[in-house]
Amino acid sequence: MRILTYEEAGRQRVGVLAEGAVVDVSDLYPSVLAVIQGGEEAKAALARAQAERAPALSVEEARLLAPIPVPPRNVHAVGWNYLRHFDELKGRRGRVDPDLPDYPNFFTKASTTVVGPQDDVPLFVHLTEKFDYEAELAVVIGRGGRDIPPERALEHVFGYMAANDLTARDLQHRSGLQFYKGKSLDGSCPTGPWLVTREEIPDPQRLTVYCQVNGEERQRATTEAMLFTVAELIAYLSQGMTLLPGDILLTGTPAGVGHGLTPPVYLQPGDLLVTGVAEIGELRNRVVAHDGRG
Ligand code: MG
């Protein structure tokens, strides 16, 4: 099932995809987060509505928002989870150039970074000259939990989305290994285009992640190349730390980021950024200059 958030007449609505059309289920659940918190019962109710109701509009007509516009807390993320991406940034991490980590390198992005699959992404031109893309598979936690063993970890996944972990490299490297500021500018985490429930994704290590800038492909890899699998990331992150329903986890970016090119190439105002996970869907975000005023 593909569950989405869309806007109509200035109000947020919840829908389910049915053969290219949107079935409105806002009367059942006011938000996708409420669906996630409702667990299996909520999914069953949405499946019934999907089968029985007439669609409200076509997906092309829908103004899509981030599936979870306001996550319950910061977006969890992991750095250096693809070997070729770790290698491409050798010598380009400012003063700090660590060894490949033995454990996942977690950080967070502020919850206010989240935007939708069709939204403009602000490029704060007064703050950064090195704004860069990172296409990633995003995992959304369903049933929360602590000390989740890896062999049970995928049972705690509600579903998957495409995401981009946009990063101001100059701000990121200014603070050494502390990524928070460079990864938390407003609008720097487009997600969507919908939330695909885990039944549709039997193996999250067999997905194709890609990124294009103005039609030029910059990143393409399969999640098979992850150093730490989705299950291992969930297991490790949940050690002594409770994961909550609706938590978002970005699983790392493959090689091909602009900062790793020779010479480096960064995003510019007007660029069209396309971020996709082939089996899930695509985000299309325009990069728009913002001078920090208004
Ligand atoms: Mg990343």
Image (cartoon, grey):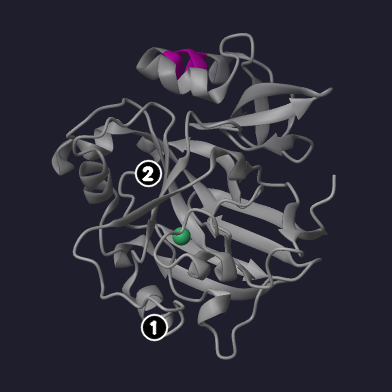
The image shows residue 66 at horizontal and vertical percentages of 62, 38
Q: Nearer the viewer, residue 87 or 29?
A: 87
Q: Is residue 46 magenta?
A: yes
Quadrant in the picture for residue 127: bottom right
Q: Which residue type does callout 2 highlight?
A: Ile
Of tags 1 and 2, the one toward the viewer is 1
Residue carrying label 1: 90
The image shows residue 94 at horizontal and vertical percentages of 46, 78
**Could you tell me which residue is drawn at 66 percent across and 42 percent down?**
116
Q: Nearer the viewer, residue 73 or 163?
A: 73
Classify 10 Å Cα crowding around label 2: few (below 14), some (14-19), many (20 and above): some
**Could you tell me which residue is drawn at 50 percent across and 17 percent down?**
34
Secondary structure type for disc 2: loop
Q: Quadrant of the C terminus?
A: top right
Question: In the image, which residues are magenta?
Answer: 42-48
The image shows residue 186 at horizontal and vertical percentages of 66, 47
Whether pointer 1 and pointer 2 mark residues with C-beta atoms closer than 8 Å, the reply is no
Query: Which of the two discs, 1 and 2, labels the residue nearer the N terminus?
Result: 1
Question: Does residue 80 appear to the left or right of 122 in the view shown?
Answer: left
The image shows residue 42 at horizontal and vertical percentages of 44, 15
**Could you tell me which residue is drawn at 40 percent across and 39 percent down?**
200
Secondary structure type for disc 1: loop
**Could you tell me which residue is drawn at 56 percent across and 57 percent down?**
276
Residue carrying label 2: 201
In this picture, is 276 found above or below 176?
Answer: above
